[in-house]
Image (cartoon, grey):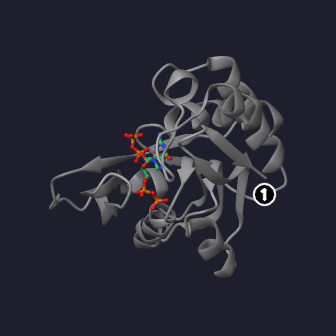
Amino acid sequence: MELLKQRIREAGIARTEEILDVSTFFNAQVDARLMQAIGDDFAEHFKDHDFDVFVTVESSGIAPSVFASLAAQKPLVIIKKSQKVMDDPRFVQQASFSFTKGNAYHLTTQLEFIKGKRIILIDDFLAQGSVVTNVETLLHKADATLVATGICISKDYQPGYQKLSAEGKDVYCQVHVTALEPQTNAIHIK
Ligand code: G4P
């Protein structure tokens, strides 16, 4: 997606060889016009997919997925990250771990929001692919199906995109970053 590529080139910061800082326009200061364009692009890409609901995982996935929901006219469910194990049949949970942030949490949502639905996951970054895998496991617990995944920025130098593609998953990434050079702030985009 050209506009997102352009913004990453202009304002992205290669913090390390792994971490791309997009906080000035994407996930701290949020450029709503960019988010709208991102949402329109997802809606266009997924227009022929047979699905009921978008889901995202809090928090940076929320902005792009709200616009995708609006553009595609499909509901959106925000999956929360909870520290608590909930002993309540109205909720479904899946234990998860963020390799990027080094923290553990439980993906949590209300069963009634997703039960039996056909679902597209939208998220901001794809790194290891663990969020996609854990969301799919969570959905299975609710007899729901992960139809496809839409990612804004795939970091192709980390294993997520290759792994999910090799598993035959339908994954659409708006931008593929292939390498970061923190010394020169070179951001390589495919
Ligand atoms: P994985 O699913 O691909 O394995 O990803 P992992 O859990 O390792 O990391 C996902 C979280 O880390 C996401 O935050 C994502 O936004 C953030 N993240 C991963 N790589 C980068 C990066 O290069 N730059 C930035 N800025 N963030 C990155 P999150 O779960 O959405 O949490 P939140 O911070 O939005 O609350």
Secondary element at image label 1: loop
In the image, 66 versus 3, the foreground residue is 3
Q: Decide: is 58 above or below 155.
A: above
Residue 52 in sight here:
no
User: Which residue lies at the image location 75% right of the left edge and 59% below the top edge?
Assistant: 50
Q: Judge: label 1 CB < 8 Å from ligand 1.
A: no
Task: Locate residue 72: give its quadrant.
Answer: top right
Q: Is residue 170 left or right of residue 154?
A: right
Q: What x and y, as percent, mark residue 114?
A: 48, 56
Q: Which amino acid does label 1 sit on?
A: His
Q: In which quarter of the image is the N terminus?
A: top right
Q: What x and y, as percent, mark residue 149?
A: 64, 58
Q: What x and y, as percent, mark residue 130?
A: 45, 66
User: Which residue lies at the image location 56% right of the left edge and 67% below the top edge?
Assistant: 160
- The residue at which mark 1 appears reads as 49
Q: What x and y, as percent, mark residue 128?
A: 49, 65
